[in-house]
Image (cartoon, rainbow, N blue to C red):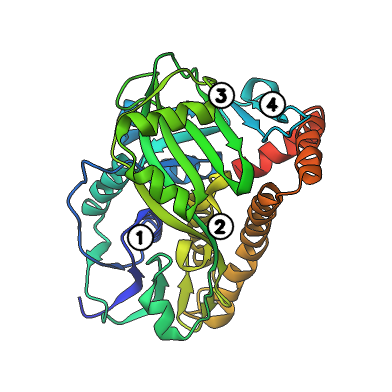
Amino acid sequence: MQSVDVLVKGRGAVGSCLALSLAAQGLTVGLTGTVEAPRTDDVRTYALNAASVQLLRDLKVWDGLPADAVSPVYDMVICGDAAADLPAGRLSFSAWQQGLRELAVIVDAAALDAQLATALRFSPHVHNVNTSTPAALTALCEGRESAAREALGVEFKPKAYGHRALATRLVADRPHLGVARQWFGAGGEVLALLPFERPSSSQSYGLVWSCAEERAQALLALPQADFERELNAATAGAAGMLSLAGARATWPLALARAEAVSGPGWALLGDAAHLVHPLAGQGLNLGLGDVAALSQVLAAREPWRPLGDERLLRRYARERLAPTLAMGEMTDALQRLFAHPSPAVRGLRNRGLDALNQLTPVKRWLTQRALGL
């Protein structure tokens, strides 16, 4: 095409959702990047909150997902690390106690990507274009290594944690019952089990294990039996005996926020705009929140105001400042708190988990924030 209203750079979940959302407004959208074939070794899972699920429903994507690609989380149990003379703290959340249908939904990343690709193929206003196609607005959704962001001169300095996240699929010897589990260990290690339906219905989990660089590489290299031994020792049988059921993959963890997320004719979304620690499972939710906010700002613009107007895009930047900054600070503070080696601090944080577990109004507030409500 000679030109488009909006040029979206990046075909991940954030870029695809933005293209569909803006096309639904009647805007002509150009989408860059290569259409990749579905992967059979993708072990990623997304933990989506209510706001993200509603966005996908509005885009006519959610109901097309296979039944076994979606698993609701009804309860969540969080455990601290035990001190020498103090048991591990415990914090639990229940959808039933909060009057909710579910706390979150775990989605197969490959299935969601495939459904988004199908929706894009049937969207008459979305076109595959090259990166030089003229547009009134360019939306950068290329991820943390965005070349277009760098070309704009936008400062983006990740603060490396020195940790990596290791992901894979597991099968347990008993049903998960929709319970997600998370353990905070010494040195800032975080192990999360996300209830899932693949490859074994009602007995599978997605694993995200964040730990120091050397330990992550060692876990990645372990033979299957040795890896399972380490995993079952770390979870102490809380979810039953766990067996490896997929390939293992890792990626580095960092905290970052772009110095500016909008400018004349451009806007940043998703990991191109902000990175947070995965301990709260909010990475994609923040990106989809960006999509919803930018779509709403563009839909509500004055008829005479162009799409790339700098003042218009500042509305998007202001809308996303508080939630992205708060999530980044919160996850960073939790990571630093549980990475602190002092036995006294370890005891205090475990008592803190136990005390918070008794504060129902505070737990309800935290749940509402996590759900994006």
Quarter of the rendering containing residue 65: top left
Across and down, in percent, residue 207 comes to: 43, 36
Measure how far apart labels 1 and 4 are at the Cα level.
34 Å
Which circle, 4 or 3, is nearer the viewer? 3
- Look at mark 4 in the image and give the residue it sits on: 98
Can you see residue 307?
Answer: no
Q: In the rendered structure, are the residues bearing label 2 and label 3 in contact, judged by CB atoms less than 8 Å apart?
A: no
Q: In which quadrant is the N terminus drawn? A: bottom left
Q: In which quadrant is the C terminus drawn? A: top right
Residue 325 shows which numbered tag?
Answer: none
Across and down, in percent, residue 254 comes to: 52, 61
- Mark 2, Cα crowd under 10 Å, few <14 / some 14-19 / many 20+, is many
Across and down, in percent, residue 171 comes to: 36, 23
Question: Is residue 96 shown above or below 49?
Answer: above
Q: N-terminal of the two: label 4 or label 2? A: 4
Which circle, 1 or 4, is nearer the viewer? 4
Measure how far apart labels 2 and 3 are at the Cα level.
24 Å
For numbered disc 2, what is the local secondary structure? loop
> Is 174 on the left-hand or right-hand side of 35?
right
Q: Name the kind of residue labelled 1 in the image.
A: Ala
Measure how far apart labels 4 and 3 are at the Cα level.
10 Å
Viewer-closest of 152 and 170: 170
Residue 74 shows which numbered tag?
Answer: 3
- Look at mark 1 in the image and give the residue it sits on: 19
Q: In the rendered structure, are the residues bearing label 1 and label 4 in contact, judged by CB atoms less than 8 Å apart?
A: no
Query: Residue at image x 52%, y 31%?
Result: 234
Query: Residue at image x 40%, y 47%?
Result: 218
Q: Name the kind of residue labelled 3 in the image.
A: Tyr
